[in-house]
Amino acid sequence: MTYTTPRLALVGDRSPAVRSHARVPGLLDALAQQERLVLDAYWIPTPDAEAPGALDGFDAIWLLPGSPYASEAGAVAAVRTARERGIPFLGTCAGFQHALLEYARNVCGLADAAHGELDPDGDEQVIAALACSLVGHEGAVDIAPDSLAARAFGATRSQERYHCAYGLNSAYLERLTARGLRVTGTDEAGEVRIVELPEHPFFLATLFQPELSGDGTRAHTAIRALAAAAVAHAAA
């Protein structure tokens, strides 16, 4: 059997000013050297992700932080591609926010679902300003034991780092979960911090940024789990 190196789409508007972007190459190198999880990674700017077929042939999609994106439509399109085609997906920070936007619009029928940072006057603000900004915050996350997140993290409690000021508007939580989205991680106040899709091979979104975990010399377990899912997808 011929081994095919899994292809990873890093969807985001790459910038040296975004700390998580600067960390990604080192984390992927660490996966290759320490875990023998070698990925062929390509950065896909969000405007490019809008084009039909832009993500064809990829074995995993990681929607990275960096909101407001150059193209909200491209970010949402990346989520939809992963969700509908069963491609392993990880969304972190803004990736989490846009995963919820995509689900609200295309699964829950909320065509006007909006992100409060881009559309502060929108009627359907599924993503809204947090009561307290999490920029620079670190806190505990409780993880449902029978979940993809628990398997990926190898634990039911984790200490995580944030750099965001927007999250899920709780007024929309019931509508999202009624259509299959599952909340599997919350902070100590019960606020949503991890969501996943149980019927999907690997679909995980976190409001926190696992790429900021530790000193950058070892990949967070969630990133490692995405890489393993990409290997399985390529093999299939």
Image: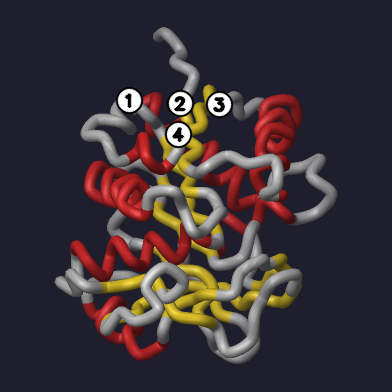
Q: CA distance from mark 1 to mark 3?
A: 13 Å
Q: Nearer the viewer, residue 136 or 87?
A: 136
Residue 210 in percent (x, y) is at: 65, 56
Dividing the image into 4 quarters, which one contains the N terminus? Answer: top left
- Callouts 1 and 4 close, C-beta under 8 Å: no
Few, some or many C-alpha atoms within 10 Å of disc 2 (few <14, some 14-19, many ≥20)?
A: many
Q: Earlier in the sequence, mark 1 or mark 4?
A: 4
Residue 34 in percent (x, y) is at: 75, 31
Residue displayed at 41% across by 68% down: 118
Q: Earlier in the sequence, mark 2 or mark 1?
A: 2
Q: Amino acid at mark 2?
A: Arg
Which dot marks residue 7? 2
- Callouts 3 and 2 close, C-beta under 8 Å: yes
Q: Tell me the residue that label 1 is attached to.
A: 57
Q: Is residue 66 left or right of residue 170?
A: right
Residue displayed at 24% across by 80% down: 178
Q: Amino acid at mark 4?
A: Ile
Q: Amino acid at mark 3?
A: Leu
* Residue 108 to residue 25: above or below: below
Q: CA distance from mark 1 to mark 4?
A: 13 Å
Which dot marks residue 44? 4
Q: Earlier in the sequence, mark 2 or mark 4?
A: 2
Which dot marks residue 39? 3
Q: Is residue 17 left or right of residue 229?
A: right
